[in-house]
Amino acid sequence: MQHKPVLYQEVLDILQPFPGGLYVDGTVGGGGHSRGILERSSPDGKLIGFDRDPAALTLAESNLAEFTDRVLLIHGSYHELALHLNNQNFHSVDGILIDLGLSSMQLDSPERGFSFRYDAPLDMRFDPGQPFSAFDLVNESTREELAEIIFKYGEDKFSRKIADAIIRNRPLATTQELAEIIQRVVPYSKSKIHPATRTFQALRIVVNKELDALEDFLPAALEVLKPGGRLAVIAFHSLEDRIVKKYFRQESRDCICPPQVPVCVCGHQARIKEISRRPIYPGDSEIEENPRARSAKLRAAEKIF
Ligand SMILES: C[S@@+](CC[C@H](N)C(=O)[O-])C[C@H]1O[C@@H](n2cnc3c(N)ncnc32)[C@H](O)[C@@H]1O
């Protein structure tokens, strides 16, 4: 299934791409948002697109074929954008987007092992060239490590039960084996999400070090953004959104001393202004058309200096 870009119009309204501008799409995926940026920055705006998944880059290359002379696609992680930009002799950019999580292509490719709806080897790597997969994580972690991962990154209150069940049933080779043992120990209510949803999210986050990448990315993005340039982040769960919210709050304040300090000693200066204090959510019609959009939250900021 072709991936529908989430909050498409909202992202373009925030980035306001202009002719001659230079933009980064840190998670190019199928190139949906990138296409909009390239169209709006016609005739000579440029875009540098990153993805950790070579299959996504192949698709983006074909979907963006008409813009080849204005697009550079890079296999790499968005948190290393400064390094890659430097290598290409670009030093600052006018706008940056990251649209986190999975694309529909990844979710709908059974062999990638992201979904418990298909039977496939436990994999979940964005970059299939990375040696460590969900198979290694599930079969080599201790009970305590598994319980902590499922609690911390899946926010699942049944984390201990699930970790115990995994240990009892190891080795586990497939998504179905894992989903079934979770279903056996976690009460399933039809009105709620599938009992394996949170564990799958947790494993995916750890396999791909997703939160570390986001934490490293935010200051790096600010560093390469031009004054007046804008940064937009679409998050799909509260762990990601909390990191972005906290960073934006901190960087939009002049002083970050603890409240008990009477006179500022930190010397911190606001480097951004938030474009809106509250996140931007998809409207009802977008959610109806694209249910994957329902948990999306967009936050955006403009660099001051
Ligand atoms: C939700 S999709 C992006 C969809 C895209 N905005 C579009 O309109 O087609 C997220 C993409 O980010 C990629 N990704 C995840 N973590 C990444 C990282 N650290 N660096 C670069 N790409 C990453 C995934 O492989 C996936 O293709």
Image (cartoon, grey):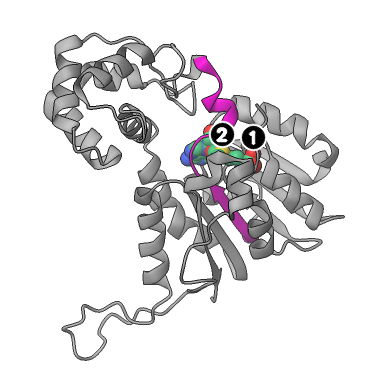
Judging from the image, what secondary structure is the residue with disc 1 in? Answer: loop
Which amino acid type is marked by label 1? His
**Which element is circle 2 on?**
loop
Mark 1 vs 2: CB contact within 8 A: yes
| Coordinates of residue 261 in the picture (x, y in percent) | 18, 85
Give the image quarter of residue 230.
Answer: bottom right
| 186 lies above or below 295 | above
Residue pictured at 33% horizontal, 9% vertical: 173
Choose the circle earlier in sequence order: 1 or 2.
1
Q: Quadrant of the C terminus?
A: bottom right
Q: Is residue 58 left or right of residue 214?
A: right
| Cα gap from disc 1 to disc 2, whole angstroms | 6 Å
The residue at label 1 has a CB less than 8 Å from ligand 1: yes
| Residue 105 on the magenta span | yes
The foreground one among 230 and 70 is 230
Residue on which the image places disc 2: 103
Q: Assess disc 2: are there few (<14), some (14-19) or many (≥20) residues with their C-alpha within 10 Å of its C-alpha.
A: many
Mark 1, residue position: 3
Which picture quadrant has residue 53? Answer: top right
Q: Which mark is residue 139?
A: none
**In the image, which residues are magenta?**
91-110
- Please state which of residues 285 and 150 is positioned toward the viewer in this rendering: 285
Is residue 25 shown to the viewer in this render? no
The residue located at (53%, 61%) in the rendering is: 280
Please state the quadrant of the image where ligand 1 appears: top right
Mark 2: C-beta under 8 Å from nearest atom of ligand 1: yes
Count of residue discs: 2
Q: Identify residue type, mark 2.
A: Ser
Q: Please identify the residue farthest to the bottom as the structure is shown.
A: 263
